[in-house]
Structures are given as C-alpha cells and as structure tokens.
Amino acid sequence: MKNLLLFLLTITFSNLYSQTDYFEGKRTYCEISENERVKEIFPLGIKCVQNRQYLGSAIEIFTDVIKIDATFCDAYFWVGYAFRLSNMNKEAVAMYYIADSLAQNKSIEFKQNLASTSMLIGADSLARRKFEEIKEYFPNSPEGFYGVALTSTKIGDVIYGLENINIAENKYNKPNEDAQLLKAILLTLNEKYSESMPYYEIVKNKFSKLDHFNGNYALSLYEIGSENKDEKNIKLAKKYYNKVRKKEELTEYIRSRFEK
C-alpha cells in the first residue's frame, strides 16, 4: 500500500503547483513587512523556486525574511516549498505547519501542501486532519475530499475513502482523470471490481504505462473473470499483470492472484 500511496502522491504533487495563481507570487496571505530588505529579497526567493534553481539560496532568502518578520506566513510556506523541492520533507512539513497556523485557515495551498507532504513522511493522522480542514474551510473545493480519499489508501478506511472520492468527483468542474484513477483503485480495494471497470477504461490511455494502474486493473479483470468463468477476461488480466515492471511494489494480494 505504501508504494501505491507514493504513486498517487506523485500525481498529486504534479498538480498542486498549477492549481491556483498563488504560485505566480503576485499575492500573499499575510501582510508583507514594510522592511525594505524583505521587499527586495522575498520576490527573488520566489523566482528561484519558480525556476527550480538555486534552491539553497532561496532557503537562505526566506530564512532571512523570517528573521526580520517572524509573523509573515508566506515566507514559511515558500521556504517549506523550497525544502520539499530539495527532498527535505520533514523540514518542509515543519515550515508548512507554521505557515498554516499563522494564516488562520485562509489558504488552501498551505493546507494542501502540508497534508500531502505529511503523507510522504508517514504523518498520516496530520495529513487526514488537514484534508478534513480543507473540507471544512473550503467546502466548494473537491481537493479536501480527494485528499481524504487519498489518505484512505494508507489508513485503510477504504469505504470512507470511496464516499469522499464520490463527493470530489461531483465537485470537479469537468472529468478529472486523477480522481477517476483513485476512484477505480478504491473500488478495487473495496472489492467492487465490476464497478471499477468503467473508470479504468476512462483513464487507460493516460495511465496504461504505469505499474499501479496495470496491477490494479489486472486484479479487477481477474476477479471478474474468475467469478464469471470468463477465460477472455482472465487472459486479459494476465496480459496487464505481465506489463508490470516492479511487481514487488504491488500488494501481496494482487501478486497472489497471478503467481500461484
């Protein structure tokens, strides 16, 4: 389940940066200091992060800003973001947590990044709490519901996860393939194999080269084929299972169905 979670989180992180205009650096959630040095260097730090360059310098810049103004929540967020891009996830979580606390529930970006990065370091209860807060403070957004569903793949309350991904699916303005993939996998985990099939079919073109798509899709095909004594489906299931390159990353149950 851990490898499945990392796979889904990779997709999540690829989308977080582009979801809002906050990352353009044109606005802040906390009032920026009138200090001239803060006004001068804070935008430079943001440009480093935006360009994915000189991240060490960006961390130094935001740290200097925090020393000047310890109440500036956005500086904590951006240094956290620079830490995450540097694979320093524990440090990122600490900074995101302070940013979110100082922002007083104004920022969905702070909560999303805090929750998602918390999952990377195994702080699942913190991640769940922050995704639940997104549901509470940003109820029109699908992201809290999606995030709760994501945590369900790790926490194990997959029925609750399925309830939340259904709500998220209805809140997205247009079909969202990432949510459809998560729903397909949650349906498989809930042993609703037939119900999962339309969702796998929808996202097949986007995800068919990925191991966790092929492994979970194969399981649903196999279980349906076994129940209906349908050799065609069983053969197709084996075909998709054989596409999986790192079979050790699949759940033990999936492997047991094909490696007898």
Image (cartoon, rainbow, N blue to C red):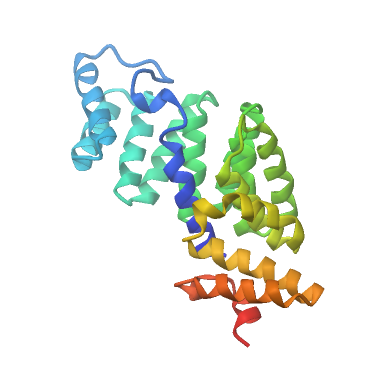
- Percent across and percent down for residue 109 are 47, 32
Q: Locate the C terminus by quadrant.
A: bottom right
- Percent across and percent down for residue 163 are 74, 46
- Percent across and percent down for residue 53 are 20, 40
Is 56 on the left or on the right of 22, as rendered?
Answer: left
Looking at the image, which is closer to me, 47 or 122?
A: 47
Count of numbered circles in the view: 0
Looking at the image, which is closer to me, 204 or 133?
A: 204
Is 228 on the left or on the right of 211, as rendered?
Answer: right
Looking at the image, which is closer to me, 111 or 14?
A: 14
Asked if 72 appears above or below 226 in the picture, the reply is above
Asked if 26 appears above or below 122 in the picture, the reply is above
Q: Where on the picture, by quarter, is residue 25?
A: top left
Is 184 on the left or on the right of 100, as rendered?
Answer: right
The residue located at (62%, 34%) in the rendering is 142
- Percent across and percent down for residue 77 are 38, 33
Is residue 51 visible to the viewer in this orientation of the structure? yes
The residue located at (23%, 41%) in the rendering is 55
The residue located at (22%, 32%) in the rendering is 61
Residue furthest out toward the right: 228
Residue furthest out toward the front: 232
Is residue 122 visible to the viewer in this orientation of the structure? no
Residue furthest out toward the bottom: 260
Q: Where on the picture, by quarter, is residue 174?
A: top right
Q: Locate the N terminus by quadrant.
A: bottom right
The residue located at (60%, 45%) in the rendering is 179
